[in-house]
C-alpha cells in the first residue's frame, strides 16, 4: 500500500471497462416474448406463462392502480382523469382492440402509445402481463355469449332466485 501509484481522477487508464459480454443485473432479456411481447418482430398471441386465478386477481389490482384513472374500471376509457376534462383514453371494447394480439397490449403498456406514457419503469414485466390478462378478461366480460361457457359449467349460471332487497 505504501507504494501504490497515484492516479488523476479523469485519467483515461484509471477506469476499467466492463468485461466483454457483461450484462447488468436485471437487464438480461433472454426470453424475447416475455420482455417485449413480440417474437421475431410479430406480436405474440399467447401468454408467455400460465395464468391462474391468483394471477388474474393481481392483474386486476395492478389495473386498478395504474390503468383505472384513465381507462375506467370497465376499461371503457371513461376514468376519473377523463371525467375531469382530460382527453378520453381508448376503450378496450373497440372492435379494433378486441381483435389485437396480447403482445400489442403488453407493448403499449411497456412503451406507451399516443398520449399514454409507458410503464416499463413502474410495473415489473410479470405484472404487465397480468394486467394484459385482466384487460382480456374485461373484453370477454362485455362480449361473451353462452357458447363461450363450457357446457359442464353452464349450470352454475342458473343459481336460485334471491328475494328482492328491501330499501
Image: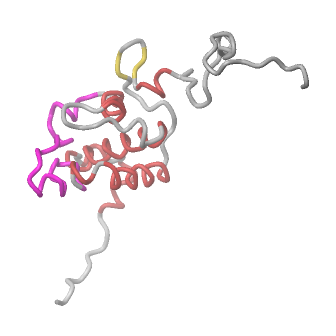
Instruction: Relative to 137, say whether 79 is above or below.
Output: below
Most foreground residue, 108 or 11: 11
**Which secondary structure is most common in the magenta stretch?**
loop
The residue located at (42%, 43%) in the rendering is 122
Instruction: Relative to 74, say whether 50 is above or below.
Output: above
The residue located at (17%, 49%) in the rendering is 76
Per the image, is 75 magenta?
A: yes
Most foreground residue, 166 or 30: 30
Magenta residues span 73-100
Left or right: where 43 falls relative to 96: right
What is the quadrant of residue 130 in the picture?
top left
Q: Residue 10: x, y in percent?
A: 60, 18
The residue located at (25%, 29%) in the rendering is 100
Q: Residue 63: x, y in percent?
A: 34, 50
Q: Quadrant of the C terminus?
A: bottom left
The residue located at (58%, 31%) in the rendering is 26
> From this viewpoint, which residue is outermost toward the right?
2
Amino acid at each position: 500500500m505504501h507504494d501504490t501509484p497515484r492516479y488523476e481522477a479523469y485519467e483515461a487508464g484509471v477506469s476499467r471497462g466492463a468485461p466483454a459480454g457483461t450484462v447488468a443485473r436485471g437487464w438480461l432479456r433472454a426470453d424475447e416474448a416475455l420482455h417485449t411481447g413480440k417474437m421475431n418482430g410479430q406480436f405474440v398471441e399467447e401468454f408467455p406463462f400460465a395464468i391462474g386465478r391468483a394471477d388474474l386477481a393481481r392483474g386486476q389490482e395492478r389495473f386498478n392502480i395504474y390503468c383505472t384513472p384513465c381507462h375506467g374500471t370497465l376499461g371503457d376509457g371513461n376514468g376519473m382523469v377523463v371525467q375531469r376534462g382530460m382527453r378520453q383514453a381508448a376503450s378496450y371494447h373497440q372492435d379494433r382492440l378486441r381483435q389485437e394480439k396480447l403482445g400489442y397490449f403488453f407493448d403499449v403498456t411497456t412503451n406507451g402509445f399516443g398520449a399514454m406514457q409507458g410503464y416499463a419503469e413502474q410495473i415489473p414485466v410479470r405484472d404487465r402481463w397480468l394486467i394484459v390478462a385482466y384487460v382480456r378478461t374485461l373484453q370477454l366480460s362485455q362480449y361473451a355469449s353462452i357458447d363461450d361457457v363450457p357446457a359442464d359449467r353452464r349450470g352454475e349460471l342458473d343459481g336460485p332466485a334471491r328475494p328482492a332487497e328491501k330499501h
